[in-house]
Amino acid sequence: MVNDFNRLDQAKRDDDRRLIDRKFTEAMRSASRKATIHLSELQPGRDYTNIARRADLLLSRCSMRPRLISHGTTMEFAWRYSTPLSEGLHLVVALAQMGLLGSIRTCANEKCGAWFFKKFPQQKFCPKGNCEAEYRKSEQGKAHRREIHRRRYGARKNLGRV
Ligand SMILES: [Zn+2]
């Protein structure tokens, strides 16, 4: 679902960019150098429609209801989900509404692969366990570190600091 929503976002950006590029070219060729985007041109592309349809099918399996869980001075409600999938989908929808979908990713440690919420943009490993330490010890991780150091050294050398 997260991947579908991210692809949906990408498809929307691609559609918008194509439309703007086309309009820009048209404007440059026209005498007035102006372009108008008509409402009918703001239709989603085929990719977007296909992904949206698939995402909607998955969402149609989401079922939940509010439930009164405590009643003190105020009433407190919680969601009761029919399946764990419904709970997951609800979380994804809530994050998408807040524009935070890009902050969810899977752990870069192939043995783990857990979904987690990024606390900083470059975060690649889940906060649980020692996935990052494990990755650094692996051949792939060591090669990655070597590449980073090689690039840093190159950059410093170009600046005449080595
Ligand atoms: Zn992990």
Image (spheres, rainbow, N blue to C red):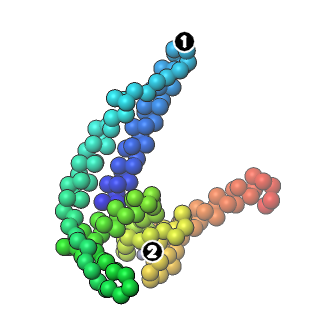
Residue visible at 31% across and 43% down in the picture: 48
Mark 1 residue element: loop
Are the residues at dot 2 and dot 1 in contact (C-beta closer than 8 Å)? Answer: no
Q: Which of 128 and 48 lies nearest the eye of the viewer?
A: 48
Residue 19: image x %, image y %?
43, 31
In the image, residue 150 above or below residue 50: below
> Residue type at mark 1?
Ala
| Residue 23 can be seen in this image | yes
Residue visible at 29% across and 65% down in the picture: 89
Q: Which of 65 and 141 lies nearest the eye of the viewer?
A: 65
Q: Is mark 2 within 8 Å of ligand 1?
A: yes
Q: Is residue 32 left or right of residue 72?
A: right
Q: Is mark 1 within 8 Å of ligand 1?
A: no
Q: Which residue corresponds to mark 2?
A: 126
- Disc 2 vs disc 1: which is toward the camera? 1
Q: Which residue, as the protein is rendered here, is positioned at the far top?
A: 31
In the image, residue 34 above or below residue 107: above
> Residue type at mark 2?
Cys
Q: Give the CA separation, mark 2 to mark 1.
A: 56 Å
Disc 1: CA contacts within 10 A as few (<14), some (14-19) or many (>=20): few
Residue visible at 34% across and 68% down in the picture: 91
In the image, residue 161 above or below residue 141: above
Mark 2 residue element: loop
